[in-house]
Amino acid sequence: MAEQEPKELLEMSTDTERLLEENDLRPLWEVEKDFGNQFGGFEADIWKWEDIQASIDAIEQDVPIADLPPGFQRRVAVPVNTGYRNAISNTIYVGVQTVSPGETAPAHRHGANALRFTIDGSEDMKTVVAGEEFPMRDNDLITTPQWEWHDHVNDGDETAAWLDVLDLPLVLDSLNARNTFENHELDRQPVTKSQGYWESQYGRARPFEDTKEDGIPGPFEGNCAATPPYRFSWKDTLQTLRQRADNDDPDPHDGYSLSYVNPATGQPPLFPTMSFRAQLLQEETDPHFHNAVDAYFVIEGEGATHVGDDVLEWSERDIFVIPPDEIHHHDPDGEAILLGMTDRPVFEAFNFYAEAEP
Ligand SMILES: [Fe+2]
Ligand SMILES: [Fe+2]
């Protein structure tokens, strides 16, 4: 049998085309062309700290938090990717938030998972989560559980700045999840726990009544599946990184690498939707590629990350992103430490994760 020309297959009479259009129907061979192309312009990109700093300083001058419209009072500059105008990627949102001395970012809660990674912090800059005031010291990582109240209070005399990392694009755009946000009736939630409470509940010795059944989820009752409130102190994280670098071999693609684990389970990912690592790089890594997105914040040092034909030259506090399936490797100039952020848990949950070397 002679093969039919594909073109003939696709030809429909004008009447048929009109009939489908009138009834909100499209043939698969048309629909198929649009699948996977809604987010077409995702490119490797970098946001230099000097530009971010100038921008957050300028909006801090112009916009007191109290003047922001009621609802979502957060003063944040958001790196946006060319292919996705709301965020750095189609799954992960990164923002740079500031709170001036004396200001409060009022209490609210939401269904999206969130964390803070402190850039300019102090003992007197506190994020209040689930009743506890967590001091935000430089490079501390503090979780905000799903649907748990949180407000940010600056009782110090310097402006504080930090990274907010949330799964907002996934939750709000892909899942189109509605009604997942609420403001507290008070700007500042009542402080009901002493400092260190949440950390103490997830150590090697845990409250008996929380462990006698299945050991999970622990004392956090806000939402039994949510990651608990927790502060990963940079002092401890850095010490562990140093021990690894002094004693172990680095991963060929990611250097000496620590996972931030869910404190309830002791396992990654930190959130069901996002995973985080502290990565210490001492030499050039081997190239690899994977279908999950990698985004980075430069904690210390400088170097370059090669992504396809692009070279992203980074230094301290820069933010950069590597699109899916792009071959990449890191080339630090001396020693550098990165915060790695990825949506890999989403891929793994659906058995889609793939990684390879070129
Ligand atoms: Fe929030
Ligand atoms: Fe990677």
Image (spheres, rainbow, N blue to C red):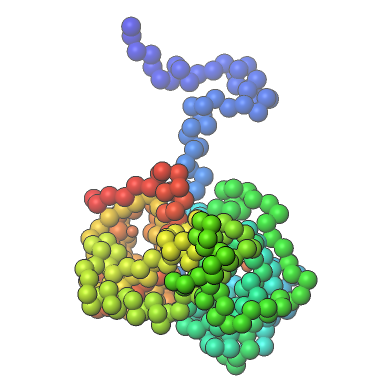
- Residue 192: x and y in percent read 68, 78
Look at 23% across and 62% down and name the residue there.
252
- Of the four image quadrants, the one with ligand 1 is bottom right
Left or right, residue 329 beside residue 46:
left
Q: Nearer the viewer, residue 247 or 350?
A: 247
Q: Nearer the viewer, residue 200 or 82?
A: 200
Report if residue 309 is visible in the image. no
- Residue 82: x and y in percent read 49, 58
Look at 59% across and 58% down and name the residue there.
224
- Residue 281: x and y in percent read 28, 72
Q: Is 322 situated above or below 63? A: above
Which picture quadrant has residue 56? bottom right
Look at 58% across and 82% down and name the residue there.
195
Look at 40% across and 20% down and name the residue there.
6
Report if residue 274 is visible in the image. yes
Which picture quadrant has residue 280? bottom left
Q: Point out the image quarter for the N terminus.
A: top left
Left or right, residue 231 beside residue 22:
left
- Residue 310: x and y in percent read 32, 61
